[in-house]
Amino acid sequence: MPEEEKQLSQKEKLEKAQKLVSNNEYRNKRGTIMREVSGCLDQLLEKTKNRQQRANTIFSDMYLKLEIAIMILVILLLSICIIVRKLIVVPLVYYNKSIMEGEIFPVIGAAELQKWAETYNKVFKENEETQRLIRRQAEHDAMTDALNRGSFEKLLHMYENGDTPYALILIDVDTFKTVNDMYGHAVGDEILKKVTGLLKKAFRSIDHVCRIGGDEFAIIMVEMTSDLKYTIEEKIKAVNEELGTENENIPAVSLSVGVAFSDRENPGANIFKDADKALYYVKENGRNGCKFY
């Protein structure tokens, strides 16, 4: 404020101020200032709005990218789960089932599991073959390959407690000890092998040919009743005819045979003793024959 205006009274200052506020110059300047302030505010609002729009756009883009990333991650996880199930879980389930059922593994799944399955199957088959050989050795006579005494007793017990009709045939090689002493044990072994072969040939594959002692044999003939005893007579007669023919290696021998049927009349203590009685009768009455209890 100029010095001269400072000297004015309060009333004069008020009047001067009123004149200044009410003149056209002041009004024009005030209008200009108001328009400039309003323009600045508009520009500020516009810039703020633009920045908000850019921020919204950036946020929307980020949110969309995040959604896409999550979807891709979910798809990847599902794909991994499907692949793991197909290549690992399902094969392991089948492997467990195969172990429970005692079967070989299906060669499926991942390459490592397939290799594992192939190795297991190889070992399984080797063990199976070994067990088969062990069972065969445990059940069969090593020299003649007929069923042994243990197998005979198990089979006889099974048929004695079953409903299937059968015949028990007990067989001795006549004068085997004399032949064995005269020709030697090697020839005696060949005679036993020949007897076994002829018995297996004469009887059916479902019948059980057993060697139960040195020169003693037994046959469990299944599905056999006493009214069919003539078939046994024919078979034993045919075997004795072949054994009675000498050759340069094996001397002639014959068989004494005793037979008891599961449906026999007046059974004794058990079927084995009854068949043994019939066998004893043949041996005491000239050998080389067949007797029925």
Image (tube, rainbow, N blue to C red):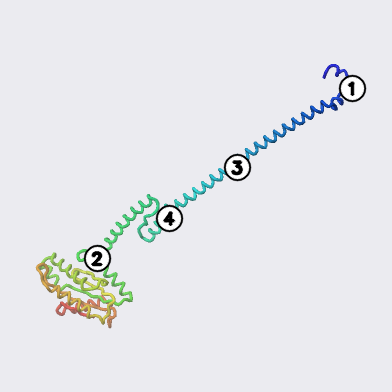
- Left or right of 142 on screen, residue 58: right
Residue plotted at (35% across, 58% down): 104
Query: In which quarter of the view is residue 125 placed?
Result: bottom left
Q: Which of pointers 1 and 3 lies earlier in the amino acid sequence? A: 1
> Residue flagged by tag 2: what amino acid is it?
His
Question: Is residue 136 shown left or right of residue 244?
Answer: right
User: What is the crowding at mark 4: few (fewer than 14 residues within 10 Å), some, or many (at least 20)?
Assistant: some
Q: Position of residue 186 (x, y in %)?
A: 13, 64
Label 1 – label 2 distance at C-alpha:
146 Å
Mark nearer the viewer, 4 or 1: 1
Q: What residue does disc 2 label? A: 140
Q: Which mark is residue 90?
A: 4
Q: CA distance from mark 4 to mark 1?
A: 105 Å
**Quick check: 135 above or below 47?**
below
Q: Is residue 85 left or right of residue 279?
A: right
- Amino acid, disc 4: Val
- Kindly identify which numbered label has been placed on residue 12: 1
Q: Of residues 270 and 20, which is closer to you in this image?
A: 20
Mark 3 vs mark 2, CA separation in Å: 85 Å
Residue at 37% across, 52% down = 114
Q: Position of residue 212 (x, y in %)?
A: 22, 69
The local secondary structure at tag 1 comes to helix
Q: Which mark is residue 60?
A: 3
For mark 3, does the 10 Å Cα neighbourhood hold few (<14), some (14 to 19), or many (20 or more) residues? few
Q: Nearer the viewer, mark 2 or mark 4?
A: 4
Residue 63: horizontal and vertical position, in percent?
Answer: 58, 43
Question: Is residue 262 positioned above or below 110 on the image?
Answer: below
Q: CA distance from mark 1 to mark 3?
A: 65 Å
Q: Are marks 1 and 3 in contact (CB under 8 Å)?
A: no
